Every structure is written in structure tokens, then in C-alpha cells.
Image (cartoon, helix red, strand yellow):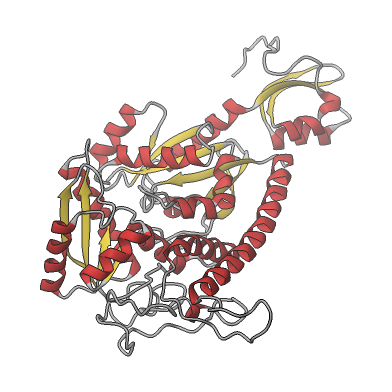
Amino acid sequence: MPVSPTNGGSDNDEGWITDLFDDDGLPLDDEFDDGADHDDESHRGAFGEFGGASRGLLDRTFRERIVLVGVTRGGQTREDTEASLDELEQLVDTAGADVLDRVVQRLDRPDPATFVGKGKVNEIAEASLAIDSDTVVFDDELTPAQQYNLERILERTALDRTAVILDIFAQHATSAEGKAQVELAQLRYRLPRLRGKKNFSQQAGGIGTRGPGETQLEVDRRRLLRRMHKLERDLARITERRSNQRKARHRSPFKTVTIVGYTNAGKSSLLRRLTGAEVTVEDRLFATVDPTTRRLQLPGGEQILLTDTVGFVRKLPHQLVEAFRSTLEVAASADLLVHVVDASGPDPDAHIQAVAEVLNEIDAEEVPQLLVFNKADQAPDTAARLVAANPGSVAVSAVTGHGIDDLLNAVGDRLRALSTVYELFIPWSRGDALAAAHREGEVVVEITEEGGMRLRARLEPASASRLSDFVVPGSSSETNLRNPEGSR
């Protein structure tokens, strides 16, 4: 649920946050009212505060009318701003509201009070009044002071892109971990936006208790901090468990491959095509929040663990990156990243750059990547051009299955290139070890000798450790077996 401390610009908002928690500081499960009966509200706008369930906008009683605001800064063009607003409009639609107008301004630097300046705020107010909008959504992040000032002037809710994305994540998170991560991100966003009149709590008299008492704002802040600390402890335990799971996977013979990419690039569709996983597939932004892992067998016989992750987006809120760090670390610890790009999108190169920025933020920029241009059936010419411009990439269609075989072969080739080659000599009496070498690695050369089988195989460290009794000393990586027929 995105944070909207006021609705309609009223100053009488001191109790808005206490309605979210019980006396123990825990979130209430009751849905919020739609705002129609609130005495302190001058407008029905309810985006994220009174419009639906506590987790987001799933049970909205009406679709809000939205005005978008974008700013073109130095180095940007009007086309860049419009493209970003197009994406924001998709986000708003996913959140459950309708965009009816947009306002664009060129600005060298943001106004500290209202972000866009007094004159532009008046223009936004006129546009909002003309269509009777409920909410104004800015494409850039607003400071708490800017949001407060805008709501007072506009007399309706003012939100930014971050609040919209947080709301969408709240709707789509299904696992306990995902819900906790989203709630923590929301609270981090909400904390600096707490405000209210100094309503004084009732305190008993006595030494050290006289005076005005504790303000409601301080009570609200303490409750939020208490809840945040609990969520951080819970997520720390989950992070530790995930770390142990990753260690176990590293000891397994299976390599890990993680699917990353811009939101709505078709990552979940690709996972379903490759593994048959029953995952949610929708033509909407951020349809997938919780990661899904499935086992996949490659054409060469190797088995891998394939994981689908949450999609990235331009201006991805820092709160989400921090809260989802334990989930996103699956990309940093992967052996290979399958970077899925929507070939039919308006600007694939910009999407690639946006994903690269997030990968850099989570320390995954050094993990080998395989670029996969999806939706080639919708834009075959563009997909062919992108593949030509990015050697080693693959064009596929997760819907029709076009290029899937090429993708699987490319993944196998990339993973084999990352494996160490060992020379082994296995006696005839150890058929189990010979079978393990074939099962857990890629045997590239086999030579029959009198006492057993000499072979050259690509093995993972865990497999090499289990077969260490048969590894020829000094044989890894650079060893060339004498093979009269040559190696393949």
C-alpha cells in the first residue's frame, strides 16, 4: 500500500498512521474505508490509503482518475520523458487506476518546495480540476516536504513513482518472505513522511511524567520503528537460511542459472516454456515478485537449477532493492545470468542499461550473461538486428517456442566453458565412478586402456572432489590427452 499521509490536503491527519496498527504495533488486517465518510477529507482521492486492502489495491471500490507529471532535465529529450511517462501509465494501470491526463515540464533543477515550481503546480491544479482527478502521480521521487506542499496546494493526493511501484509489489507478493520484504520497503518509505498535529496522549501524573506528554507523531514513529526492527530480524533469519541453501547448492553437481530482465520482458513465460512450471504469466508489469526455481535438463544431459526473479525497471525504488536484497542475491551467486530482453519493446537498449544498473547495485555485474531477445514472433526484424549487434545472443519466442533449442544449446555451451577440465583414470572395477563422471559432468574424450578407462571431463568442483581418487595429478584445465582421433 503506497503511502499517502494526507488526502485532499487537510492538516487534520494526525491519526492516519495509528489506524494501521493495533496497540502492540502490529498491522491491522481490516480494509480501509474508501474515504467517502472521512470528515477531514475534502476529496475522494484514495490512491493507496483508503482505496483498498492493507496490502494494496486489490479490492478497490472505484478506479481513480490520475494525472501524470513528468520533468525533462538536462541531457534528456521530450521523447525520453514521454517514454518514461508511458511506462508510468502502465504502472498506474497495473496498480488499478486510470490515467486521464499528463503534464510535462522542462526543468534544470527541482524546486525544493514543490519539485516543479509554483506556476506549474497551478497548471497541474487546473488540469486536475478539469477532469476531476483523484490523484496526481509524479514520475520522479518526491521529498516528504514536496509531497506535503503539493497536497496542500492541489487539494488531492500527490504520489511519486516509488509509491506506485510499492503498491504493485504489495498486491503481487504471495510468499511470507515477499510480503515481509514489501512491508519493510513501505515502512522505510513512510517513516520520513510521518506528520501531524501535536495531539497529546494521556499520561498519569507523577515524577518525570508532567508536561505535555508524548506527541502522536512520536507514538506513530515508535510503532513504525518497532515493526521495522521486527521485519528486519525476520528477514535476517531468512537471509541466513538462503545463505545455507546456496552453500548446499554449491556442493551439488548442478549449476545455477538465473533469469533476469526488465519487467514484462517474458521471464516467467520463458521459465514455463523451458520447465513447464505453473507460474503466473500476465502481460502486466511486475506480475512476478516471488522467485521460482525449477530443475532443467540441457541437451547435453547436464541438469541445472533455473530461477525466475522479480523484474527490474527504470528508477527502481532504493527501498525495494534493499528490502529484496536477499532475494536478488540469487542473481549475484548464479553461475550464469540469462538476461531476457523484450525485442518488441520501444527501447530495448534502455532496458538493457536499466537492468545493468540494478545488477551493479547488487554486485552481480561480474556474473557471466547470456542475452536472450524474447518476443521475436512480434518483432522478427528487430530481434534479428539485436542479435547481430550482440554476438553470442539468441532470439526466441517463449510463446511459440521459436529459438528455444538454440537457447538451451547456448546455455550448455556457456556453462561448459565455465567448467574445469580434468583427466581421470577409472579402473574397470569402478563402474560406479565412471557412471558418475558421465552423469555429473561432460565427458569430452574417452580412451580404453588395459587397466581401465582414461577420460577427459568437465567437472564442477563438488563432482571433482567426489572423484578426486581418480583425478590424474596436475591434469586440470590445461592438460591435453593424447587422442589419436582428436578431441571433440
Q: Quadrant of the N terminus?
A: bottom left
Pick whichever, 469 or 228, lies toward us: 228
Task: Give the total number of marks visible in the rendering.
Answer: 0
Q: Nearer the viewer, residue 87 or 403?
A: 87
Residue 487 position, x and y percent, is 62, 16
Picture coordinates of residue 242 (x, y %)? 67, 52
Name the residue at 36% across, 56% down. Answer: 143
Give whichever of 73, 297 is nearer the camera. Answer: 73
* Quarter of the figure that contains the C terminus: top right
Q: Outermost residue, right direction?
A: 429
**Residue at x 70% of width, y 50% of height:** 245
| Residue 175 visible from this viewpoint | no
Front residue of this view, candidates 300 and 244:
244
In the rendered structure, the answer to whether residue 82 lies left or right of residue 196 reads left
**Is residue 30 placed above or below 104 in the rendered structure?**
below
Residue drawn at (66%, 76%) of the image: 208
Q: Where residue 316 sits: x, y (%)?
A: 40, 50
Q: Residue at x 24, y 44 (%)?
A: 109
Residue 476 occupies which quadrant of the picture? top right
Relative horizontal placement of residue 406, taking residue 66 as reference (left or right): right
Q: Is residue 153 above or below residue 140?
A: below
Identify the image quadrant of residue 162. Answer: bottom left
Asked which quadrant contains residue 405, the reply is top left
Left or right relative to 292: residue 473: right
Counting from the top left corner in percent of width and height, residue 161 is at 33, 57
Q: Is residue 417 visible?
A: yes
25 to 334, vertically: above or below: below
